[in-house]
Image (cartoon, helix red, strand yellow):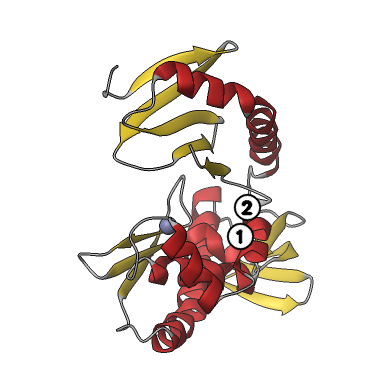
């Protein structure tokens, strides 16, 4: 059996397979093209992986269809009338051209004003908007991390925001550092809190095992609801006991 990352074909679909010292088989469908990747325990054969994939084929196809729909919907031109999400709410973008520095302001419960210099191109408008997203996520998350670290009796970790393709957050235990995906700013507050708690729980438990789940249940009994809400729109993952 190959322990190198390699590909197998299941029902005409190419699947990336990697073997890791893990307990559960993990199947992920990744944007932007719906690539399928399986992380399998070392002792699990390719045939067993193939069977596991076959049994999830309906789920995989549904994830891939979602990505396609999302890709169509997420092309952004930063022009008036576009929909943009902020903390779980949908807003209509209103581009205001002027002479001042670029900025975004929340006009009311349905409209975001994007102030840009007259004649700004797409790249400039995008830069202003994404900088605002980043600043808002930072402002929203800072007290959240502090408060949850206190509740969980942990030191407040270093943390930062970056764009990630396949994860909402990561925890570098050795560096005492948490990274959050910038995309989170589009999600409802409780979903952002769920990711914060999830990453902080990793300081107690590295793996997604029973101990991890017990800690999540203790600190955030509703976490499954928030997780499902978060994953209803993007970044599909499934994990199951093997
Ligand atoms: Zn995790």
Occupied quadrant, residue 65: top right
Badge 1: residue crowd in 10 Å (few <14, some 14–19, many ≥20): some
For image coordinates 20% across by 64% down, the residue present is 174
Q: Is mark 1 within 8 Å of ligand 1?
A: no
Image coordinates for residue 50, horizontal then vertical, percent: 51, 19
Tell me if residue 188 can be seen: yes
Image coordinates for residue 139, horizontal then vertical, percent: 48, 80
Residue situated in front as seen by the camera: 43 or 207:
43
Could you tell whether 235 is left or right of 65 in the image?
left
Question: Given contact means CB atoms under 8 Å apart, are the residues at marks 1 and 2 in contact?
Answer: yes
Q: Which residue is mark 2?
A: 231
Q: Is residue 187 above or below residue 40?
A: below
Q: Which residue is mark 1?
A: 227
Image coordinates for residue 215, horizontal then vertical, percent: 46, 71
Could you tell whether 186 is left or right of 5 in the image?
right
Could you tell whether 3 is left or right of 61 in the image?
left
| Residues at marks 1 and 2, CA–CA distance in whole angstroms | 6 Å
Tell me if residue 117 can be seen: no
């Amino acid at each position: 059996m190959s322990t190198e990352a390699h590909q197998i074909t299941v029902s005409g679909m190419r699947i990336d397979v990697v073997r890791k010292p893990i307990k559960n088989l993990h199947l992920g469908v990744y944007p932007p093209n719906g690539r399928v990747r399986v992380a399998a325990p070392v002792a699990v054969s390719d045939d067993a992986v193939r069977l596991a994939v076959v049994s999830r084929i309906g789920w995989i196809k549904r994830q891939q269809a979602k990505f396609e729909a999302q890709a169509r919907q997420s092309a952004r031109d930063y022009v008036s009338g576009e929909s943009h999400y902020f903390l779980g709410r949908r807003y209509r973008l209103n581009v205001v051209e002027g002479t001042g520095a670029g900025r975004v302001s929340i006009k009311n419960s349905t409209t975001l004003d994007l102030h840009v210099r007259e004649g700004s191109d797409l790249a400039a408008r995008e830069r202003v908007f994404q900088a605002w997203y980043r600043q808002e996520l930072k402002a929203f998350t800072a007290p959240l991390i502090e408060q949850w670290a206190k509740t969980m009796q942990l030191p407040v970790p270093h943390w930062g925001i970056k764009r990630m393709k396949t994860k909402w957050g990561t925890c570098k235990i050795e560096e005492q550092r948490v990274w959050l995906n910038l995309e989170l700013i589009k999600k409802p507050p409780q979903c952002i809190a769920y990711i914060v708690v999830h990453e902080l729980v990793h300081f107690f438990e590295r793996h997604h095992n029973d101990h991890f789940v017990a800690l999540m249940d203790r600190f955030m009994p509703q976490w499954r609801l928030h997780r499902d809400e978060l994953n209803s729109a993007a970044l599909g993952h499934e994990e199951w006991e093997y």
